[in-house]
Amino acid sequence: MDGGRHLLTTGLPALLAGDFNTLLGPEDKRGGAPFRITADVYQFRQWLNANKLQSLIVKGGPYTWCNNRKGQARTLEVLDRAIATTSWFDLFPTAVSEVLPRHASDHAPLLIYTSLPTPSGPNPFRFERFWLDYSSLGDIVKYGWNMPSYASPMGMFQQKLRNLQRSLRQWHRSQIGNLQVRVHEAHQQLQQLMELESHQSVDSPISDSIRSTSNKLSALQRQSEMYWAQRARIQWLKEGDKNTRYFQHRVQRRRIRNRINMVRTSEGIIIMIRNKFTIM
């Protein structure tokens, strides 16, 4: 704790993590000799209180040390911690400390997240604007909407929507695929053709392949821009400005801003959100 004492005197936001080799209470120990308050325990508690240090919320675990013995002699303890100052929590209010599995050591490593890891879930269905570039879209819509349904009138409408969504998803996966991958592949193909052209005569028929591949790449880039522009909800930028990276950045910022990781009740109780909630 000597290094921690020096750091705390600076007044800067501070996070301290590692093996403190001290328990705080009986809940920090399982098995072995009963917990008792020693001078080390008392001093550790006093040090935490004097510096207004708090532990990060622990995910997994909670025990971070094991003597690796068997039977009644096996002991588990919380010796490793991540603690921080109040000013540090002001910067990272949703930070958590995850206790990872012990491997090749009697101590478990700690993985610290400065923000809550957001569990992934199924993406919401969206009608993509660039789908309108494909002539087969109309047939897919008719097929999905006209699939038989035997529910009530209201249930039939909901079933038709689900059938249509399923048909469009399957069509997208089989006929369009990953736009970013297709853009990359078309770019590489065009580059290879241009390198090949440099070693052939100017009237080589490869120029037709270059023109065709170039048109294909332009169409895919336009669709990619429409994809990201739709997610960024930007209407004032015209399509064709080649601002795909800008759109991606806007989407990432919007997702971070809309993420809900915790809720504070009227009584001041903080509830951690385990599922993904976003403000649409």
Image (cartoon, rainbow, N blue to C red):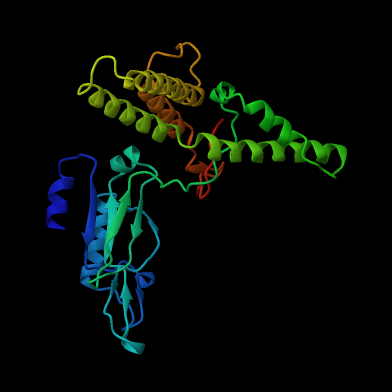
263 and 142: which is toward the camera: 142
Where is residue 180? Give x, y as percent: 40, 32
44 and 167: which is toward the camera: 167
129 and 153: which is toward the camera: 129
Q: In which quarter of the view is residue 42 placed?
A: bottom left
Residue at the far right in the pictured view:
152
145 and 98: which is toward the camera: 145
Q: What is the total number of numbered labels drawn onto the structure image?
A: 0
Q: In which quarter of the view is residue 77 placed?
A: bottom left
Left or right: residue 10 versus residue 258 is left
Residue name at image x 82 percent, y 39 percent? 156
Where is residue 221? Give x, y as percent: 41, 22
Q: Is residue 250 above or below residue 65?
A: above
Quarter of the picture holding the C terminus: top right
Left or right: residue 27 versus residue 165 is left
Quarter of the picture holding the N terminus: bottom left
Residue name at image x 78 percent, y 35 percent? 146
Where is residue 175? Give x, y as percent: 54, 35
Q: Is residue 74 above or below residue 131?
A: below
Q: Is residue 70 above or below residue 92?
A: below
Left or right: residue 258 versus residue 142 is left
